[in-house]
Amino acid sequence: MALLVPAEGREAYAARVQALVARNAALSIINSQLAEAEMSKATLARKAGLNESAVRRLLTAETANPTSDNIFRLMSALGIKLEAVTPSGERLALV
């Protein structure tokens, strides 16, 4: 697919693909932890301070596009710890 993208746009294309992969991975983790916690989407929404129907759409839609704020709130409500690892290997807690 990248060959169809002009050379000057490949870096932006790769960054967008990487962001989509990360988003999908985050939603998958949230879904699996929700099931493991045996928590309903309604309960998760309340714990995260989000609208129940919005959470339901985020976790069931094929093309969900949650904001980072919503991802972080859902992860926090499930007790999921999130960290960043710098290029030097330093680990920084985010959520």
Image (cartoon, rainbow, N blue to C red):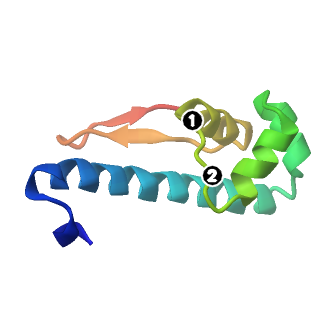
Decide which of 70, 94 is in the foreground and name it.
70
Q: Amino acid at mark 1?
A: Thr
Q: Residue at the location (35% across, 57% down)?
A: 17
User: Label 1 belongs to which residue?
Assistant: 67
Q: Is residue 70 above or below residue 31?
A: above
Task: State the count of labels.
Answer: 2
Decide which of 5, 52 is in the foreground and name it.
5
Disc 1 element: loop
Q: Residue at the location (58% across, 30% down)?
A: 69
Q: Position of residue 44 (x, y in %)?
A: 82, 42
User: Label 2 belongs to which residue?
Assistant: 64
Decide which of 87, 24 is in the foreground and name it.
24
The quarter of the image holding the C terminus is: top right
Disc 2 element: loop
Q: Which mark is residue 13?
A: none
Q: Residue furthest left?
A: 7
Quadrant hosting residue 45: top right
Q: Position of residue 59 (x, y in %)?
A: 72, 54
Q: Residue at the location (37% across, 39% down)?
A: 84
Left or right of residue 59: residue 84: left
Q: Is residue 20 above or below residue 44?
A: below
Q: Position of residue 31 (x, y in %)?
A: 70, 58
Mark 1 and mark 2: Cα distance apart in space: 10 Å
The quarter of the image holding the N terminus is: bottom left
Left or right of residue 24: residue 75: right
- Using a 10 Å C-alpha cutoff, classify the residue at mark 1 as few (fewer than 14 neighbours), some (14 to 19) or many (20 or more): few
Q: Residue at the location (70% across, 49% down)?
A: 58
- Using a 10 Å C-alpha cutoff, classify the residue at mark 2 as few (fewer than 14 neighbours), some (14 to 19) or many (20 or more): some
